[in-house]
Amino acid sequence: MWKDWIRPFLRPLPQWSPVALAPPQQLVNATLRWDGTSADVTADHTVASLKPLQIATSLDAGQRPVLEYRDNATGRLLGVLRLAQTASVATENASLALYHVAAGEHHCLGWPRRPWNAWLQNRLMLKNRSPHFAMEPAEVQQLMTAYLCVRPVVLVSVDAPGHRNIFPMDLIGPLGRSGFFSLALRSTNVSVPAMREVRRVALSNIPATMKAVVYKLSEHHKQPLMDWNALPFPVRPSREFGIPAVAAALRIQELTIVHSQEVGSHTFFLGRITSDENLAEGDQLHHTAGFHQAYRRKQGMPLTEV
């Protein structure tokens, strides 16, 4: 039917696709290029802030590097972010570079669907614009390009005197060359002061089958948890710190926070992994861009959506 053919052109693709994937993701490689030099930063770049959109990496790549995302199987260029250096973060004898995303584009969809889908998505974003926290549509498009490097979802546990909480995050990741692990948490999160004070958290890598429970816990970005026993799943103490973590987690990592600072809309935490328990094998909940899933579906290799 002609209606089935035309329907994809009348509705925008989802911005984000929740998918099941065995970690670490090896589908997409990220390469930083500058002044005739290049470096693999698949495990050495992360989002440090959403507003403005900023990327952190252990590499000083000059003033205006380019970040490329390529399909690991085919080498095809999937997307590009053009960066502009803004500042550096110095701590513990290591320095990180912060880059503002000046421009970006993806190549997952062909013409004319790519600009048409972006127009549909941008129109919908403007229509549903939040008065409290609204990224510009162009920045959201750039953020979706950053999510070509499929991002794992974890539950972050905080246990401090007078404060306990657990909430999902995907603005996380290793900064390989420096040895840091980073978390970019919106500064309005109720646990930011406690995390700065106690300087330790536990990260539970979550099975994809727990997506609904994980999304429900998003409410704890605004309100703390009253009682660990009120959670809809059992918890177990983390190995060194004894912080309640998800008993069904695939992996539990303890993070000692060594530095934090406000970067735009977010508080950027840097830490060192204190302990790392691999508890089970399985597919972890991840997020990627909807147009990335559309590309993979067209190539006959879609990710498993949850």
Image (tube, helix red, strand yellow):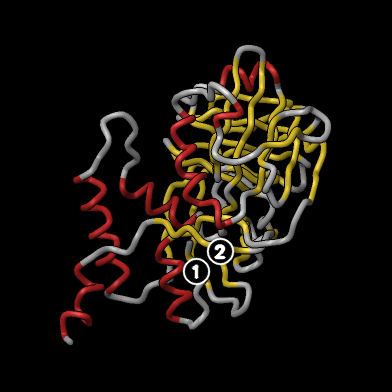
Question: Is residue 89 left or right of 267 when viewed as pictured?
Answer: right
**Residue 199 place in picture, x, y as percent:** 71, 22
Q: Is residue 246 above or below residue 16?
A: above
Decide which of 159, 29 is in the foreground and name it.
159
**Structural distance between the alpha carbons of marks 1 and 2:** 6 Å
Disc 2 residue type (three-letter): Tyr
- For mark 1, give the secondary structure: strand
Question: Is residue 215 left or right of 134 when viewed as pictured?
Answer: right
Give me the residue at 59% from left, 17% from top: 163
**Residue 201 place in picture, x, y as percent:** 69, 30
Does any portion of residue 85 appear in the rendered image?
Answer: no
Residue topped by disc 2: 69
Q: Are marks 1 and 2 in contact (CB under 8 Å)?
A: yes
Decide which of 239, 81 is in the foreground and name it.
239
Residue topped by disc 1: 78
Number of residues whose C-alpha sits closer than 10 Å to that of mark 2, classed few (under 14), some (14–19) or many (20 or more): many
Residue 171 position by quadrant: top right
Number of residues whose C-alpha sits closer than 10 Å to that of mark 1, classed few (under 14), some (14–19) or many (20 or more): many
Q: Is residue 250 above or below residue 6?
A: above
Give me the residue at 31% from left, 48% from top: 137
Give me the residue at 50% from left, 22% from top: 190
Q: Which mark is residue 124?
A: none
